[in-house]
Amino acid sequence: MWWRFIKAVKQRQHRVAPTTWVAAIAAVVYTFAPIDLIPEIVLGPLGFVDDISLWGIFAVLFAREQHRWLTSLERK
């Protein structure tokens, strides 16, 4: 199901909300950026909380987009 959704986005059959794009880009950039709000070096495993929370927000928005896509398929 996920692959069909990604294929629909790629073929422009479904338009993804701008907030989802922003969250996706922010998650990738923040994960690989050398600057971190909660550094892992200082706080150890607790430093991953900000990274994981940003990816969690993206996962929720991605699931919302998939739900919107499925709803639009049911209407057709």
Image: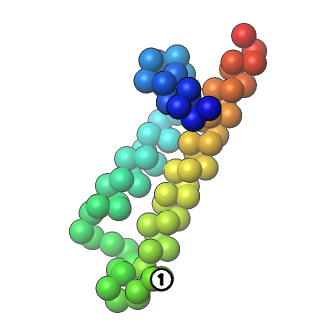
Which residue does the image show at 34% across and 60% down from the upper left? 30
Please tell me whether residue 52 is drawn above or below residue 6 in the rendered image. Answer: below
Task: Name the amino acid type tagged 1.
Answer: Leu
Model colouring:
rainbow
Front in this rendered view, residue 5 or 61: 5
SS label for mark 1: helix
Please tell me whether residue 10 is drawn above or below residue 28 in the rendered image. Answer: above
Residue 74 lies, in percent from the top left, at 75, 18
Residue 61 lies, in percent from the top left, at 58, 45
Residue 45 lies, in percent from the top left, at 45, 83
Which residue does the image show at 44% across and 17% down from the upper left? 11
Quadrant of the rendered image containing residue 4: top right
Quick check: 48 left or right of 5? left
Q: Tell me if residue 16 can be seen.
A: no
Query: Which quadrant is the C terminus positioned in?
Result: top right
Q: How crowded is mark 1: few (under 14 residues within 10 Å), some or many (20 or more)?
A: few
Quadrant of the rendered image containing residue 42: bottom left
Please tell me whether residue 55 is drawn above or below residue 52 in the rendered image. Answer: above
Quadrant of the rendered image containing residue 40: bottom left
Query: Which quadrant is the N terminus positioned in?
Result: top right
Front in this rendered view, residue 1 or 71: 1
**Count of marks placed on residues:** 1
Front in this rendered view, residue 26 or 5: 5
> Mark 1 = which residue?
46
Which residue does the image show at 46% across and 70% down from the upper left? 50
